Image (cartoon, rainbow, N blue to C red):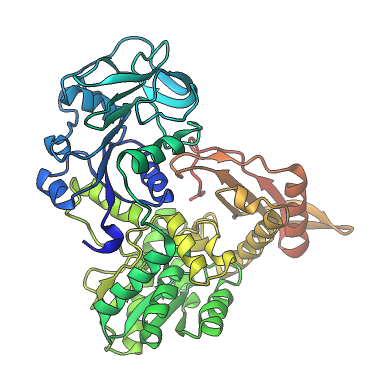
């Protein structure tokens, strides 16, 4: 086991929407962790040799036939265990306690009374504000356990077996609504499990540079830049590791953000001095999209065209590049494991526009163990500009799915300028980092307006800004009226083809974040 992973936490996932958040909180505290399916093979758990185990929550009831059970190996390793919500109930059931579906279910903010510290809750408030989400509850403790916290609806809100270092909590410490949740997780990791902080950006970079050099030797490596965060960080990391052995390829589809090509060239060619090849493919994409209105058909065409353009460009670069680097990140790996049913079978994520399986490359995926926030930290440490690293998500098909119906070069140009105006105003008003995603949408309909003293007949632009934790649900952002007014003014003044600007106040659900 390498030094960086010498101490690690295993998180067994029982389907909670917060499981990835648990992992992020653990890593933010400086400890490496991995997420594996809740019924992961005993041999695999033993081989991993975790120093602590966290059992996630989940939507199932331990009382239901076929609900997931905790592998017996978890309690045979002799390491500290923390069960959260379903994980607590499953642990109690596995160790001889009892769980019932009675009393009042708790969903949302609640308060529990800390009865005694007992290790896990040492130092927290006696009246603890928490986030509950459960229907079942523990009715009888397993031998060796004592109650650490309770409230009127949940008589065993936190429990512990101090001798064996097994703990269970009915609430979620990983969410911000549990105000002292970070302190509870820290206590478990450092005071109970006796772990040390080994997961830090500079050490991750040093280790990855060493691994990259060992893996590729003196070979050339190709990385396809998309303009997004992940591929940018991969390129910067590889360049620091292997320098001139790296070749970057950027495909200009004509469907990019405003002046994105210029920004990529400025950062990677002029600032870093990388070997960057730009493929100008706008005509090919717009010709292929002519007359196409259906969003899914647009996606299919763009993916197919990208593969063709990328393949042709690679042939022109020469046949002596055996490695392809791509920005697979940890959520991709977790989702693949969930889809396959067990984490040993992990499909390749072709993040570069859906590359075919028969591409003549071996893969280099240096950020596949990182969450997005960790990738951003690495990017800043590698010298990438904050304006690139902190930018909002952008769909793979680009402006094609933000231009309703058929997308043309003229429509894309109008949309790119309007989007730039909106994002610029968000930054001026210090709102860009307060929203999770913001963008403009082009509507191919015209409305009457007045510019100067003349009647103006122009297009409609819709603005969208949302706040979200996981992008599974999202709320529309209540932007200040003054900000929206300025954004509308700038768009209509700077994009002459636009006559009207509207703001989308649809949350997800019922809507989606993107319009197509």
Q: Is residue 19 visible?
A: no
Residue 454 position (above or below residue 123): below
Residue 117 horizontal/vertical position (percent): 39, 25
Could you tell me which residue is drawn at 17 percent across and 54 percent down? 345
Q: Nearer the viewer, residue 13 or 335?
A: 13
Could you tell whether 482 is left or right of 311 in the image? right
Could you tell me which residue is drawn at 32 percent across and 81 percent down? 221
The number of discs equals 0
Q: Is residue 274 visible?
A: yes
Residue 438 horizontal/vertical position (percent): 59, 52
Residue 494 position (above or below residue 14): below
Residue furthest toward the left?
43
Could you tell me which residue is drawn at 36 percent across and 43 percent down? 190
Which of the 4 image quarters holds residue 233?
bottom left
Location of the N terminus by quadrant is: bottom left
Residue 258 horizontal/vertical position (percent): 60, 68
Residue 374 position (above or below residue 114): below
Residue 139 horizontal/vertical position (percent): 27, 13
Could you tell whether 140 is left or right of 130 in the image? left
Could you tell me which residue is drawn at 25 percent across and 37 percent down? 80
Could you tell whether 53 is left or right of 509 in the image? left
Could you tell whether 91 is left or right of 229 in the image? left
């Amino acid at each position: 086991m390498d030094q960086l992973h010498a101490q690690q936490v295993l998180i067994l996932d029982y389907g909670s929407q917060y499981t990835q958040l648990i992992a992020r909180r653990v890593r933010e505290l400086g400890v490496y962790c991995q997420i594996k399916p809740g019924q992961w093979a005993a041999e695999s758990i033993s081989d991993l040799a975790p120093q602590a185990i966290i059992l996630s929550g989940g939507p199932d009831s331990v009382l239901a036939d076929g609900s997931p059970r905790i592998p017996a190996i978890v309690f045979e390793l002799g390491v500290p265990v923390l069960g959260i919500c379903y994980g607590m109930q499953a642990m109690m059931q596995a160790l001889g306690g009892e769980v019932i579906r009675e009393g009042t279910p708790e969903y949302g903010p609640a308060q529990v009374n800390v009865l005694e510290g007992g290790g896990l809750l040492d130092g927290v408030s006696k009246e603890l504000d928490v986030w509950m989400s459960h229907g079942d509850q523990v009715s009888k403790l397993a031998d060796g356990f004592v109650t650490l916290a309770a409230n009127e609806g949940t008589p065993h809100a936190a429990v512990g077996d101090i001798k064996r270092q097994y703990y269970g909590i009915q609430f979620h410490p990983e969410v911000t609504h549990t105000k002292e949740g970070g302190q509870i997780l820290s206590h478990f990791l450092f005071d109970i499990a006796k772990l040390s902080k080994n997961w830090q950006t500079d050490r991750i970079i040093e280790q990855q540079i060493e691994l990259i050099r060992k893996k590729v030797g003196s070979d050339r490596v190709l990385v396809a830049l998309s303009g997004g965060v992940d591929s940018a960080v991969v390129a910067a990391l590889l360049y620091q590791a292997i320098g001139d052995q790296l070749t970057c390829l950027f495909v200009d589809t004509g469907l990019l953000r405003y002046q994105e090509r210029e920004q990529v060239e400025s950062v990677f060619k002029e600032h870093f001095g990388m070997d960057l090849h730009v493929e100008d493919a706008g005509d090919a994409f717009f010709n292929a999209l002519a007359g196409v209105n259906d969003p899914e058909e647009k996606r299919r065409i763009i993916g197919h065209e990208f593969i063709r353009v990328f393949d042709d460009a690679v042939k022109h670069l020469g046949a002596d590049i055996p490695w392809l680097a791509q920005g697979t990140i940890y959520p991709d790996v977790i989702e693949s494991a969930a889809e396959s049913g067990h984490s040993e079978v992990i499909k390749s994520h072709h993040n570069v526009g859906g590359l075919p399986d028969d591409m003549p490359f071996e893969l280099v995926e240096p950020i596949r163990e990182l969450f997005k926030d960790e990738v951003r930290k690495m990017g800043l440490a590698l010298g990438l500009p904050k304006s690139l690293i902190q930018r909002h998500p952008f769909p793979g098909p680009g402006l094609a799915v933000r231009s309703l119906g058929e997308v043309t070069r003229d429509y894309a140009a109008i949309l790119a300028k309007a989007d730039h105006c909106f994002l610029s105003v968000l930054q001026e008003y210090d709102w860009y980092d307060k929203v999770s995603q913001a963008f403009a949408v082009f509507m191919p309909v015209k409305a009457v307006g007045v510019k100067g003293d003349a009647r103006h007949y122009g297009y409609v632009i819709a603005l969208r800004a949302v706040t979200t934790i996981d992008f599974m649900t999202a709320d529309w952002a209540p932007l200040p009226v003054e900000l929206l007014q300025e954004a509308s003014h700038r768009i209509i003044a700077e994009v002459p083809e636009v006559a009207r600007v509207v703001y989308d106040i649809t949350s997800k659900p019922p809507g989606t974040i993107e319009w197509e």
